[in-house]
Image (cartoon, grey):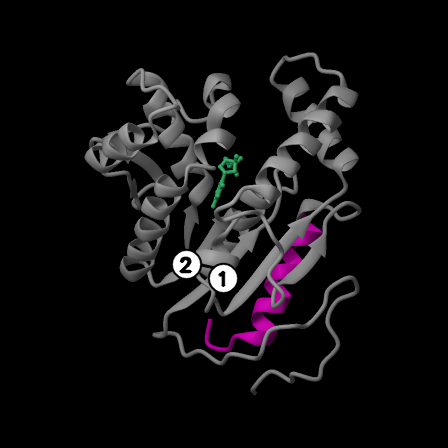
Amino acid sequence: MPPNPAAPLPAGTQRRTPLFVNRPSDTIIITIDGPAGTGKSSVARALARRLGLDLLDTGAMYRAAAAIAIDRGIDLAYPDRIVAALEEADLHFDWAADPPVILAWTRPIDHRIRDEDVTAIVSQIAAIAPLREHMVRKQRVIWEQHPRLVAEGRDQGSVVFPHANIKFYLDASASVRAARRAGQLKAAGHDVDPQDLVAEITHRDQLDSTRAVGPLICPDDAVRIDTSDLSFDQVVDRLESIVHERVTGI
Ligand code: DC
């Protein structure tokens, strides 16, 4: 039975995109964007698993670029050199792994991309215009090769895949995101002041949403979900039910 476009959506969500109908063989692209600390990556992974789609973690690509810049000793004042190194590195994923593992120069680089020095500079790396152009091109090629995809990042619905079947934008208050991050850091044995984290997150939001290229924005046609008061499973359930409502044959 075709989905009913007039059916009510779960509380807290808005319908903005037109209804798309897909057959199983069709391409499908679901984008999930939003700031750090909304649980986006884990949600995207769980959603992709439930729906049997491939997962594209674009943050891993920007993190890999930052790791390459550091490990090759390339100064951020020379963006062209970073882009040249990236072209040579031919970033790609090993899709046989779950989640897919990112490789540079055919070697896995996933063990490096969450290190503190990488996290410290990745926002600056992600603001380099030619580097973003390189990533956008690569991400579109990945979709050609993996045409049933959940793509997660900051600009996936707004820039990279404006024609996406469904665009999600996950958000949460800065204090909730800081508390989640504090929990993760504590679990990893780091002692942190939540107030410092609120300031850090607010600063990063400001950088991400005001940069000239690919800024973090919520596209007009995205389904925006505030995850502040929702559990992880509630968020995944909500996304999954919206996908099933709008896309048949998935
Ligand atoms: O989601 P993450 O924390 O792994 O992202 C790492 C950095 O990359 C973060 O500063 C935002 C940036 N990023 C981006 O600018 N565009 C994307 N599509 C994905 C990530």
In this view, the residue in front, 190 or 122, is 122
Give the residues drawn in magenta, as a range. Answer: 233-250
Q: Residue at x 40, y 42 (%)?
A: 129
Q: Is residue 116 magenta?
A: no
Q: Is residue 244 magenta?
A: yes
Disc 2, disc 1: CB below 8 Å? yes
Q: Amino acid at mark 1?
A: Ile
Location of residue 171 with respect to 118 vertically, above or below? below
Examine the residues drawn in magenta and state their main secondary structure.
helix
Q: Residue at x 77, y 41 (%)?
A: 173
Location of residue 178 with respect to 58 vertically, above or below? above
Q: Residue at x 43, y 57 (%)?
A: 160
Q: Amino acid at mark 2?
A: Leu
Query: Around disc 1, counting alpha carbons within 10 Å, would you say few (fewer than 14), some (14 to 19), or many (20 or more)?
Result: many
Identify the image quadrant of the N terminus. Answer: bottom right
Secondary structure of the residue carrying numbered label 2 = strand
Q: Which mark is residue 149?
A: 2
Q: Which residue is mark 1?
A: 30
Image x and y of residue 2, in percent: 56, 86
